[in-house]
Amino acid sequence: MKILSIETSCDETSVAIVEDGRKILTNRIYSQIDIHQKYGGVVPEIASRNHVIKLPYIIDEALAESQLSLAEMDAIAVTNGPGLVGALLIGLSTAKAIAYSLGKPLIGVHHIEGHIAANFLQFPELAPPFLTLVVSGGHSHLVLVEDYQTFKVLGRTIDDAAGEAFDKISRVLGLGYPGGPAIDAAARNGNPDAIAFPRVMLDKTEYNFSFSGLKSAVLNYLNGMKMKNEAVNPDDVAASFQLAVVEVLVSKTIACANSIGMKTICMAGGVSCNSLLRTMMGQAAADAGMTLYYPDPILCTDNAAMIGSMAYYNYINGEESDLSLNGIPGLKIGTRQ
């Protein structure tokens, strides 16, 4: 089964063709990072306008690379939330038009579920159940994947997502946007033990995250150093901040897995590319006798291949959308509308 999938939930315009939920035939991604860097973050209106301009060309590129036609697609998939509503509507309008004109099934896909499904594309042996840490610019979730259609959120951020905290601290350090790669690069030259930033664990029996206090602690440190007219080493701040975030993510994930007796862990989302997170989670999982999966970086960022993978499992389990499918910025995991 060949599915043409579209992802436009934020600032990446992506089109992919995925076969049987596991094989990528093409995965074209146009990134708007260069456009939004001058603003220090994504400007929703600009993102939407660029999706309008680029999406037809990305579709043509995907079809040309795969040497397939639209008529050869078995279904059309699209992200319908969560995300920026204007950006979502561009992808939805396009997917609906293609599905309607060709008489093909339309499949709505939840963006976070797509991130989780990215692991299916890389690891043919992977199957539910497993626990997934989803960490990106807008999301920090611990999700129990009971089967291909059943997702149970066991933990989530109660304020800032991990990626959002990375972006904000990178901005105040003058390291640029996007913050995740910038902090990761700077931290390699810094001392992670230079500054004792707090680790916010909340209640030890729950698995929610909170990064707003850590963000405030970094800002207070920087302001304090400025008031004392003392020099700040940005690399040390980046390394110390990164370690504080990663230690919380790792400890919460391992504790959650232990609490439910789960021996298989996955990571997904842009922040799962972080080198320290991959190293520390790998070591912690090995120490706990757990198996850890995470996809290549290209499948961790927003991309349409992950949407095509999840769409396959939605479709074979009877989930088909109609033309009333809408873009929902705050769509809850496990739902379509």
Image (cartoon, rainbow, N blue to C red):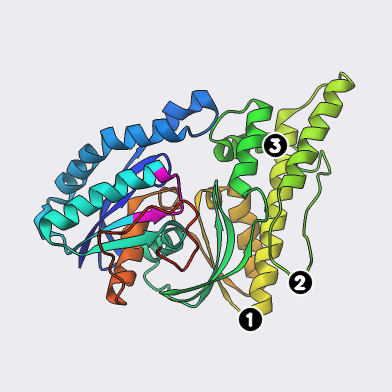
Query: Which residue lies at the image location 68% right of the left edge and 29% below the top edge?
Result: 172
Q: Secondary structure at mark 3?
A: helix
Q: Secondary structure at mark 2?
A: loop
Query: Which residue lies at the image location 24% right of the left edge and 52% below the top edge?
Result: 95
CA gap between label 1 and label 2 equals 15 Å
Find residue 131 and report its horizontal and vertical position in percent.
55, 71
Find residue 219 and report its horizontal and vertical position in percent.
77, 34
If you read the primary sequence from the N terminus, does the residue marked by circle 1 or circle 3 appear first? 3
Label at residue 246: none
Q: Is 31 located above or below residue 230 in the figure?
A: below
Is residue 313 visible in this depiction of the protein?
A: yes
Q: In this view of the protein, which residue sits in the foreground, 41 or 252?
A: 41
Q: Which residue is mark 1?
A: 261
Quarter that holds the N terminus? bottom left
In magenta, the rendered stretch is 79-85
Q: Secondary structure at mark 1?
A: loop
Q: Is 197 located above or below residue 139 in the figure?
A: above
Query: Which residue lies at the image location 39% right of the left edge and 62% below the top edge?
Result: 122
Q: Is 316 located above or below residue 73 in the figure?
A: below
Q: Is residue 80 magenta?
A: yes
If you read the primary sequence from the N terminus, does the residue marked by circle 3 or circle 2 appear first? 2
* Amino acid marked by disc 1: Gly
CA gap between label 3 and label 2 equals 29 Å
Query: Which residue lies at the image location 54% right of the left edge and 31% below the top edge?
Result: 177
* Amino acid marked by disc 3: Ala
Q: Which residue is mark 3?
A: 238
* Amino acid marked by disc 2: Thr
Q: Which residue is mark 2?
A: 205
Quarter that holds the C terminus? bottom left
Is residue 32 visible in this depiction of the protein?
A: no
